[in-house]
Image (cartoon, rainbow, N blue to C red):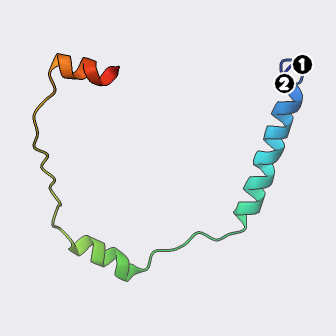
Amino acid sequence: MNIAKNMEAIFLAAVALASVTSFATASNPAQRITPAAVTQAADDTTMTVVTITGKRLTAAEKAALAN
């Protein structure tokens, strides 16, 4: 089957599928965040720090990994 000949039908099918999907999901209300969850997140001021230690690869090691 030649896709170039049927590109209009493929486009219309994709638009129809996107429209049906948007209407199907539009009826679900958005979940709301309770104020307690917001204040709890604001009170948590500690930041997680991740330290990564390790040696850098040499050019020969990089070339060996690329193969």
Q: Disc 2 vs disc 1: Cβ atoms closer than 8 Å?
A: yes
- The disc label shown at residue 5, or none: 1
Q: Position of residue 18 (x, y in %)?
A: 75, 46
Quadrant in the picture for residue 46: bottom left
Report the residue marked by disc 2: 7
Q: Considering only vertical position in the picture, is 16 above or below 65? A: below
Which residue is more in the foreground, 24 or 63?
63
Which residue lies at the image location 68% right of the left edge and 69% below the top edge? Answer: 28
Q: Considering only vertical position in the picture, is 38 above or below 2? A: below
Q: Considering only vertical position in the picture, is 10 above or below 47? A: above
Q: Sort mark 2 into few (<14), some (14-19) or many (20+) by Cα contacts within 10 Å.
A: few
| The C terminus - image quarter | top left
Tell me which amino acid carries mark 1.
Lys
Tell me which amino acid carries mark 2.
Met
Q: Position of residue 48 (x, y in %)?
A: 17, 60
Quadrant in the picture for residue 24: bottom right
Which secondary structure, mark 1?
loop
Q: Position of residue 3 (x, y in %)?
A: 84, 22
Q: CA distance from mark 2 to mark 1?
A: 6 Å
